Amino acid sequence: MEVVYDTVVEGRRDAGLVSEVLLHGDHASTLLIAAEAYSRHEWHLFDESVVALTEPTTADSLAWIPERHRWRRTDGRP
């Protein structure tokens, strides 16, 4: 499991928020993002829902409001 802990949310400095969790399985990974789909083409971060993506790279192709930073692995691998 890898976790994104944001200390700057929507331009403000806050105590912190877990915004993404990458769960590793034996054969695949699932990315959980604190977000909500407002439509097929509009995704809002830091919302009250959780979006689960079975292909973590899918998140990079969605239009996020505010802009989402690309996932960076914490184990040093690409």
Image (cartoon, rainbow, N blue to C red):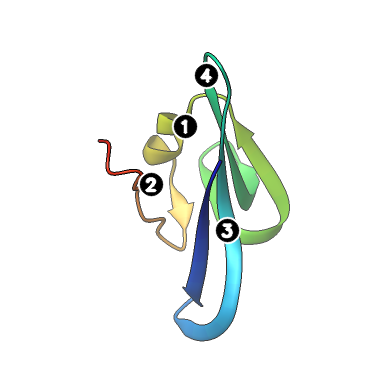
Q: Among all residues in the image, which is located at the extreme front? A: 75
**Residue type, label 1:** Pro
Residue 71 circle label: 2
Which residue in the rendered view is the most extreme toward the right?
A: 48
Tag 3 and tag 1, C-beta contact below 8 Å: no
Lower position in the chain sequence, tag 2 or tag 3: 3
Q: Nearer the viewer, mark 2 or mark 4?
A: 4
* Mark 3 vs mark 1, CA separation in Å: 14 Å
- 26 w.r.t. 47: above or below: above
Q: CA distance from mark 2 to mark 4?
A: 16 Å
Task: Please indicate whether residue 12 sits to the left or right of residue 50 in the image.
Answer: left
- Indicate which disc, 1 or 4, sits on the residue closer to the N terminus: 4
Discs 1/4, front: 4
Which amino acid, mark 3? Answer: Ser
Q: Residue 28 placed where, x, y %?
A: 52, 19
- Please state which of the two labelled residues, at mark 4 or mark 3, is closer to the viewer: 4
Whichever of labels 4 and 3 marks the residue nearer the N terminus, that label is 3
Q: Front-most of 55 and 36? A: 55
Check if mark 1's residue and mark 4's residue have beta carbons within 8 Å: no
- At horizontal 34% and vertical 48% (from top left) the residue drawn is 72
Closest to the observer, 7 or 48:
7
Q: Is residue 57 above or below residue 44?
A: above
Checking the image for residue 19, the label placed there is 3
Residue labelled with disc 1: 56
